[in-house]
Amino acid sequence: MATEHLGDRMAKLRRAADLTQEGLSGRSGVSVDVIRKLEQHRKHSARLPTLHSLASGLGVELTALLGDPPAVPSSGDAEPPQLVAVRRAIMPPLFAPPAEPAGAENLSLPLLRAELAEGWTLYHSAAFGRLMDLLPGIIADARLVAAVGDSEERAVGQAALGKALQLGGHLAIRLGKTDLALSALERAYAAAGDSGDPLLAPMVSNSVAWAYQRQARLDDARNLAVHAADDVERDHQGTAEGVRVWGGLLMSAATSHARGDDYDTANTMMLTAEQGAGRLAKLPPPADGRLVSVFSRSSVRIERVRLAVQHERPEEALKLSKGMRLSADIPPSWRTWLLLDVARAHADLGDADGAVKALEALRRVAPGWMRHHTLAVAIASDLWAGSARPAGLRKLVGFLGVDQ
């Protein structure tokens, strides 16, 4: 469960791997003292590079250590029908003719693009249940458009199919299904190769890098993001779309450096990205920014706050976040990360009041996302276990299902 203490999950995984605390320390490079404090609940969280090292030592994905998303717990039960339908849409059954989508005669490219934009809006709003309902139909519609018409029309359809499958990959990552995500993204990358959109393959590469990060494949994630960013920087810096895709890839590479405990390199890359974001003000905006990588000065600053928190630099994180004015195109998912990191920074500094205020703001701004973040549960649990319980904390722990 998402509310299970990190130390308890780690102890179960350690015993399943037939490791002593000393054995896990030897495999992961994490001190026995840190492992012991986590398992004894004397320490409630750890730096992200430490968590990656522990996951590697245990031989599991990072998501197994942090806990499953609330939507699809790994309880051994059968997957819900919604998720099975998404799987079938991403990976159609072998030796079965594709079913013709209902209402195919009314399908048009503008309608499909509107469906895709709405799908990405649902994703960024954490409306995962609704998205699972709609995504199989969106993918089926995209496959149909990609298969009809002349070569130019099919290429445009392949671009739509690539975005639909990329969306499926992002949803699968959020549900803790990274293998399904990579299957979707491999298909999205193939569709991108058959499309007329030269920026689609780099955008999908960024998504693949994210999946690699979730599997602790940090070198693979970093190398992929850097290679794709170099290509985009060479060929597509004259458009807002190109700058946004390049910036998203650079931030992804920086995150991989940070998760590998190379904060200085990550920070240098983030500063480069933040400077590059200034070019967006001089370029015409994308026709539909919902279908292009999230990248702006605001998104870079949000990511810098996150990396500072994850590397136990709470003062730096709060300084970076002070006075931030988020651009209008920052989706709820990114606003969620910022408020969570601000709450974590306040908690790390012993400022329970500041942490609760940030969590209350998050509940107002994005209650759906708050329920899907194990970090929100961890922060609330730590605050509840502390001696100071500010006004409003009881309502928060009740909302998150934290044991009282």
Image: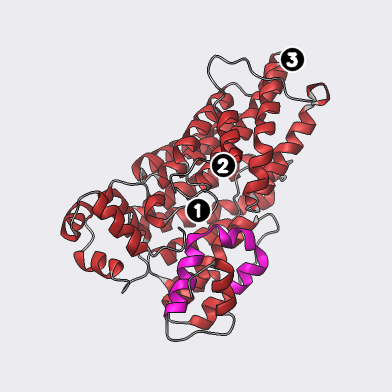
Q: Position of residue 303 (x, y in %)?
A: 51, 58
Q: Earlier in the sequence, mark 3 or mark 1?
A: 1
| Quarter of the picture holding the N terminus | bottom left
Task: Specify the label residue 194 is tagged with.
Answer: none
Return the residue found at the far right: 106
Give the amino acid type for the residue marked by disc 1 in the picture: Pro
Q: Overall secondary structure of the magenta stretch?
A: helix
Q: Is residue 199 visible?
A: no
Magenta-highlighted residues: 359-385
Q: Is residue 148 visible?
A: yes
Name the foreground residue: 261 vs 389. Answer: 389
SS state under label 2: loop
SS state under label 1: loop
Left or right position of 290 against 95: right
Q: Position of residue 2 (x, y in %)?
A: 47, 59
- Label 2 and label 1: CA atoms lie apart by 14 Å
Q: Which residue is mark 3?
A: 149
SS state under label 3: loop
- How packed mark 1 is, by other alpha carbons closer than 10 Å (few <14, some 14-19, many 20 or more), is many
Left or right position of 279 against 343: right
Q: Which residue is mark 2?
A: 80
- Label 3 and label 2: CA atoms lie apart by 36 Å
Q: Which residue is mark 1?
A: 69
| Quadrant of the image occupied by residue 347 | bottom left
Name the foreground residue: 229 vs 6. Answer: 6
Q: Earlier in the sequence, mark 3 or mark 2?
A: 2
Name the foreground residue: 195 vs 50. Answer: 50
